[in-house]
Amino acid sequence: MKPIHWLAIVPFIGMLIGPVVHNKVHPMILGMPFPLGWIAVWVVLTSIIMGILYALDPANKGDDAGEHAP
Amino acid sequence: MIAALILIALGALAALGLGLWARGGRSMDVEQWAVGGRGFGWVFIFLLLAGEIYTTFTFLGASGFAYGVGAPVYYILAYGTLAYVISYFLLPRIWVYAKHHSLHSQPDFFTRKFDSSALGALVAVVNLIALIPYLVLQLTGLGIIVSVASYGLIPKDAAIWIGAIIVTAYIMISGIRGSAYTAVAKDILILLVVLFLGIYLPLHLYGGIGAMFQRIDAAKPGFLVFRAHGESITWFVSTVILTAFGFFMWPHSFAASYAAHEARVFRRNAVILPIYQLILLFVFFVGFAAVLQIPGLKGGATNLALFRLVVKELPPAVVGIVGAAGIFTALVPGSLIAMAAAMLLSKNLIGLARPTATNDQTVALAKWLVPVIMLIAVYFTITGNATIVTMLLVGYSFVTQLFPTVVASILPRPLVTAPAAFLSILTGVVLAAILSFTHTTIATLAPGLPQGIQDLNVGIVALAGNVIVLVVVSAFTYRMHTAEAA
């Protein structure tokens, strides 16, 4: 695990914490009940976080050089 | 009605045509048939892995679940997204290993990693028990979709037979390419259909998504949030984590990843697939839209919520297109499942009895096992009853038991031994089976515990037993191993 890989923990915490802390219909997010809207927003944020991870991860640089069979 | 019939027939023909055309004059050796020559770029891999999200189970099941129970359906959106995060780390390592050792099935991975064909055979048996109900579920969904979308003109059983024949034909002839080509058509169709339904129906019936949820909340207070007991917030968190672990352990998804042409494909897909998941929101919206429109569906009939609403509100031509999309959602995953089952049966179980078989003989046998597996699935589908759903849940808890061993085996230093892997998977599977068939929950196991803990998904018990055995037996056999060596 490279340090940058720890970024992948963020979606787990972010996604799950909203409904845990606030399991109520209001305030609605984009017309959706709060827990559903929260999860939907975190789906988008997860894509963004994984995009940052992809861009910063040295394994994706160059010619797939990071891959070595065990 | 005739328009609907014609569109459904066209959908079925298109699936067959695409599946057969996919072969494109290639000779089908084992590399081509099972893993597409390991040449698939990110689009095909994306669609094959996304295929797992949009099966009939989500199309009918997720909308039906939203209709029937409300908030608990939210977990489906969360677990898929987190499973893709896990895939960023998991799949590239599995792919590299599979390519290096020319693996073709999921049990191959275990056989090779631990140098134990007994472990491979155990995994193959676990796989088969999990895969057959999954295939049955796709065919059951197909039967429902075609009979409802044809306004009852095509009987369920006829639809199931036709679907099974189409899948068998294109899998035998084109292998995994057949699945990949039909997956393209499937995803375009389903995308259009789901977006249209999920936007149009709430707008038309309620004046918008916000207005729809306001009305549901007023009519059924508490329906749109997690419950105080049972499907509570701790149920949500534990179920999301468990199913995210199990997601890529399904043997057909696992083996489909072998078809990629480079490891980076998976990391790129881990960025895009979460967004793609958002289409599920619109499936939920259709299910929620049905709540106040089609009241009174109970039990298994909730799966009809989406189609009942579509038939009630939209003209036959649209019903036909939705029906055609539904056929594809059954055929694509169905074909991957049938292929994975045939391959592991041929290679990892029957192969044990004939160790001298060449790769070409193995794949030739696998091809002829496809119709056998489809026949078994058709039999269970037509004679089947409600226990199939129980079997599928058991299947999910079964494949999840492979997760600890897979994770431990891709670490830089191998920490677990073959006997530990064997015993831990066996323990997990046996525990999962007992818990499912006796309908045990943590509340019945330990009534004294606080409510929050009682609502945890009981699958955690099986997985915990699995991990404990893995650690203890590894520690024990590892020392024996090094003592012997010294």
Image (cartoon, coloured by chain):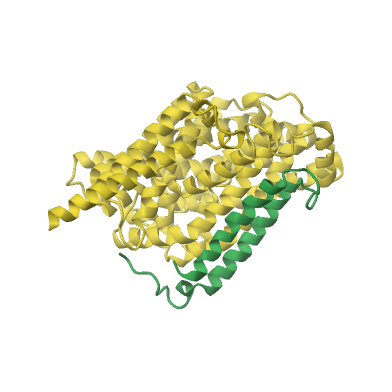
Residue B480 or residue B3, whichever sits in front? B480
- The residue positioned 65% from the left and 40% from the top of the image is B73
Seen as rendered, the residue at the extreme right is: B207
Quadrant location of the C terminus of chain B in the rendered image: bottom left
**Residue A49, percent across and down?**
60, 65
**Residue B264, percent across and down?**
47, 67
**Residue B372, percent across and down?**
37, 33
- Please indicate, yes or no, whether residue B29 appears anywhere in the rendered image: no
Residue B176 or residue B229, whichever sits in front? B229
- The residue positioned 39% from the left and 54% from the top of the image is B407
Give above or below for B390 relative to B176. above
Residue A60 or residue B450, whichever sits in front? B450
Q: Which chain is in yellow here?
A: B
- The residue positioned 42% from the left and 73% from the top of the image is A64
Chain A's colour is green
**Left or right of B49, for residue B113:** left
